[in-house]
Amino acid sequence: MATVKYRLKRNVNKDKSTIYVYLSYGRGNMFEVKTGFSIDPKDWQLKLGFPKQNNAESKYLLSNLKSLESFIHDSLNSSNSKGELIDKHWLELKIKECFNRVEKTDLEVFTNHLQYIIDNAHNKKIRGKNSVGLSESRIKGYKTFLGIIEEYQQVKGKTIRLTEITNLFAEDFKNWLLKSKQYSVAYAGKQIDNLKAVCNDAERLGIPTHSNAKNIESFTESDEERFIVTLSFEEIKLIYDTPMPTNYLENAKKWMLFGFELGQRGEDLLNVTQNSIRYIEGLLTVDVHQKKTKKDVSVVIMKPEIIEMLENSIPHKISLQKFNKYIKEVCELAGLNTLTDGYKVATDNEGNRRKVFGKYPKWELMASHSLRRSFASNYYKRISTPVLMGITGHSRESDFLKYINKQVDKDDNAKLFAMQYKQLMI
């Protein structure tokens, strides 16, 4: 049964507050949007959720809200019979229809469609997969991209339309990202990919786009420009052998040593609990649900010191933000001071935080993703690539090799096959 209620929310000015309509439609389906009406809070009945009947204006407002409530209920029945999606966008449209506020939405405006993607992200069909809903990281990426496009529009002094997205436009946008914003090649390349994705989505829905949008070329940094910061087995042993002066750093150190053997993203690593551990034929196995890929993987831990640590107790819970901070402290104490090429986040003169390339002591470049990369790099060619990919969650070997900045080596693959074949014959 659908429920329609009204509530006041945030001040519009000194005297008025905005009236919002709240629709509860089935379990987990709750939407709240502006009605377009406002009222002095002293003229509002909080318990009933309607205006007091103390003046002509309030009586007229009550009539409108009652009409909207009936219109929403009637529209729900009609939309259900047609199999329409009931969401926030639907509710906003019904308010406009009820009060004849429907305006022609300019669907060719780039930011309009990008906002539409964000608003409907949890209901979007994922391309190439039999599932619905973009990941939280993808939604966050689109929101960041929206801010970048809005800034670019201000610089250009115009509203960008989908029909303007051509190779020439993409080239100008790319130059602005790299030269004016001074983004890294990889980050600028991601924004061009976002540009193409929005155009593709609009075209799929029949919204006019430029025919040249399909030909926009993606790019990323070259192998020479890609700097992967990892720790070798010898450097990991330095961390293991270095005593920590505080409990919080000792705890972070345990998570790090565990992470070097688990091969998962920082967020997934820190979500491991005692319930994640089980034994398969005497082997300590850790079950992980990868939040980004939505894959379930199982990893056998083989190092005796890590097995002993996990059998005693999992390190206590810590936030990813604090973990990334403590990782640097642990590595500094372990003496990982070798000057290393890489990108470090810094604040520029305008207060913007961005990655700056340079040579830094290695500990300054360490973060939670370094653990997973170290796992993949250290065990590459020691463990067959498909097995490693099954653990890291990569679907394609090309993506896996790019992740650790390696090239396909046919000779090494041949040698690895020969070695594993001999072991099979023993």
Image: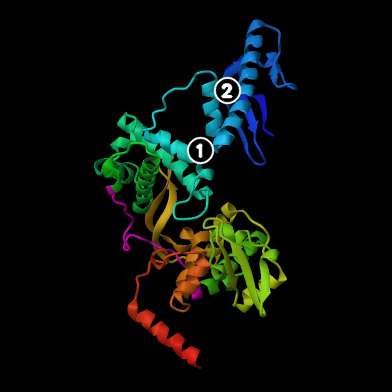
Part of the protein shown in magenta = 215-235
Q: Is residue 60 above or below residue 20?
A: above
Quarter of the image for residue 220 reads: bottom left
Which residue is outermost to the bottom?
A: 426
* Coordinates of residue 57 in the picture (x, y in percent): 63, 8
Label 2 sits on residue: 35
The front one of 414 and 101 is 101
Q: Is residue 247 above or below residue 212?
A: below
Q: Is residue 364 above or below residue 57?
A: below
- Mark 1 vs 2, N-terminal side: 2
Mark 1 closeness class: few <14, some 14–19, many ≥20 residues within 10 Å = some
The residue at 50%/73% (across/down) is 387
**What amino acid does circle 1 point to?**
Asp
- Queried whether the magenta region covers residue 223, the answer comes back as yes
**What amino acid does circle 2 point to?**
Thr
The quadrant of the image that shows the N terminus is: top right
Q: Measure how far apart labels 1 and 2 are at the Cα level.
A: 18 Å
Label 1 sits on residue: 119
* Coordinates of residue 67 in the picture (x, y in percent): 62, 18
